Image: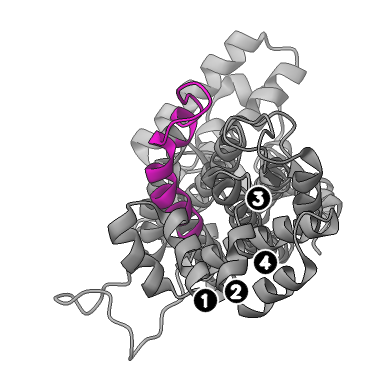
């Protein structure tokens, strides 16, 4: 990813665009073939030399052309003919964004593969489901991870759509009228590069495309933040159901406390997600440029796009490593289910009371009263209900036991896990 956004890569794209445009003109008879061959054989640039020239010209593309001219000689007069800087800049940027998207799509695929595998592995790993941070009803760790998998798959598809959107170039001249050339040159260059010509560019390619890519990056980063936040909660001492990979005897969790085993890598992921999300506002604001173009978008994109892509690329790789190596304590999950004294089964009790003919509100208040008593006296809800006449008059003890049967909550788990087969992992 660093190579995609390097200065050398960018200038290499510039050179390819310039040569392709000249090649097209040569095919039309506008450039002597011997000059084209001279350009191709001698065209070279030096990043440091371009920067040196730019300090004088205060113009990056002009400095680049000057450096090429130094190396090519008189035949260089055919370069950049009828073109404007943004013809080179925006078309090259499309190539960089496309290459970055390819890497991110591949990274998302690797993470998706690890996530689907973990969901299937723990399809029946029973644990407390939590809403508002409070025990709700039993679920499985596999179901939790399956939700991440489908979200990651949607994020990958957004990247595919954004990749198509940003794969557009332009060589339409200073205000998009092709006054310095003709549409054939644009078509020739874009086809050679695997891009679509922007159908109605001004001096630039419209920035809604770039905003779409940045939004896709931010949403995917949000998914990773969701995973990281959940893992951080599950790693807390009071929960301790999942832990990051840790190398005892080598790794240190704290400079002061030898016992510490912190979820610092997931915390870092949450922090980096903020960097990626922060790129969305400037990307959207870049859509509104003055008339056919101003330069307010350029400085933003030089920082925003590489930073967001680099951060997300790292996050995807890191998340893959963490999910593959995380320690899932299924015994601890079962232990934690007991700390709420059977309250997670309250809805099942409620439904059986309703089925027995009790009005819903009466049943709700009866179970709620029992739940309060269970919590305050630290007594299992089953025991409280066994001493509640309104319940024992309707159900035998064995029936009461069935209300707290965990199998009910596993009944349809495989139905959800089976849906993972819909995800195509190349």
Residue at image position (57%, 17%) is: 364
Q: Mark 3, mark 2: which one is toward the viewer?
A: 2
Residue ID for mark 2: 43
Mark identifier at residue 110: 4
Q: Earlier in the sequence, mark 4 or mark 2?
A: 2
Residue at image position (73%, 37%) is: 399
Q: Secondary structure at mark 4?
A: helix
Out of 385 and 217, give the one closest to the viewer: 217
Label 3 Cα neighbours within 10 Å, binned few <14 / some 14-19 / many ≥20: many
Establish if 372 lies above or below 413. Answer: above
Tell me whether circle 1 and circle 2 mark residues in contact (CB < 8 Å): yes
Q: Which residues are magenta?
A: 283-310
Residue at image position (50%, 73%) is: 45
Q: Mark 1, mark 3: which one is toward the viewer?
A: 1
Distance from label 1 to label 3 (Cα)? Answer: 48 Å
Residue ID for mark 1: 71
Label 2 Cα neighbours within 10 Å, binned few <14 / some 14-19 / many ≥20: some
Establish if 188 lies above or below 297. Answer: below
Distance from label 4 to label 3 (Cα)? Answer: 11 Å
Q: Earlier in the sequence, mark 4 or mark 1?
A: 1
Tell me whether circle 3 and circle 2 mark residues in contact (CB < 8 Å): no
Find residue 152 and report its horizontal and vertical position in percent: 65, 50
Q: Secondary structure at mark 3?
A: helix
Residue ID for mark 3: 152
Count the numbered circles shown: 4
């Amino acid at each position: 990813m660093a190579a995609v956004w390097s200065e050398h890569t960018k200038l290499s794209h510039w050179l390819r665009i310039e040569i392709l445009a000249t090649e097209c003109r040569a095919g039309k008879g506008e450039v002597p073939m011997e000059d084209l061959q001279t350009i191709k054989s001698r065209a070279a640039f030096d990043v440091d030399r371009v920067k040196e020239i730019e300090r004088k010209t205060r113009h990056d593309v002009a400095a680049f052309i000057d450096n090429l001219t130094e190396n090519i000689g008189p035949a260089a007069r055919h370069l950049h003919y009828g073109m404007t800087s943004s013809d080179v800049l925006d078309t090259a940027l499309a190539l960089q964004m496309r290459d970055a998207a390819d890497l991110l799509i591949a990274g998302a695929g690797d993470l998706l593969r690890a996530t689907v595998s973990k969901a299937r592995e723990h399809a029946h790993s029973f644990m407390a489901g939590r809403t508002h941070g409070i025990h709700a009803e039993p679920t499985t760790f596999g179901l939790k991870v399956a939700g991440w998998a489908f979200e990651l798959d949607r994020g990958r598809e957004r990247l595919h759509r954004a990749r198509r959107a940003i794969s557009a170039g332009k060589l339409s001249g200073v205000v998009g009228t092709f006054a310095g050339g003709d549409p054939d040159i644009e078509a020739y260059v874009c086809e050679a590069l695997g891009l679509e010509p922007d159908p109605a560019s001004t001096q630039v390619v419209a920035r809604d495309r770039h905003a779409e890519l940045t939004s896709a990056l931010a949403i995917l980063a949000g998914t990773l933040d969701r995973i990281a936040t959940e893992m951080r909660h599950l790693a807390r001492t009071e929960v301790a159901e999942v832990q990051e990979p840790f190398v005892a005897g080598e790794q240190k969790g704290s400079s002061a406390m030898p016992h510490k085993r912190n979820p610092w890598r997931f915390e870092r992921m949450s922090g980096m997600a903020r960097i990626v999300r922060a790129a969305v506002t400037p990307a959207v604001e870049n859509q509104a440029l003055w008339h056919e173009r101003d330069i307010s978008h350029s400085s933003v994109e030089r920082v925003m796009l590489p930073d967001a892509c680099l951060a997300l690329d790292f996050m995807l790789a890191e998340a893959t490593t963490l999910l593959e190596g995380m320690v899932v304590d299924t015994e601890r999950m079962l232990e934690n289910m007991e700390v709420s004294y059977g309250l997670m089964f309250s809805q099942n009790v409620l439904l059986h009371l309703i089925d027995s003919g009790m009005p819903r509100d009466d049943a709700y208040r009866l179970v709620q009263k029992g739940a309060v008593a269970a919590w305050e006296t630290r007594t299992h809800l089953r025991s409280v209900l066994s001493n509640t006449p309104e319940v024992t008059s309707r159900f035998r003890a064995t029936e009461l036991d069935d209300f707290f049967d965990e199998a009910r909550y596993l009944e349809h788990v495989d139905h959800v896990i089976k849906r993972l087969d819909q995800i195509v992992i190349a």
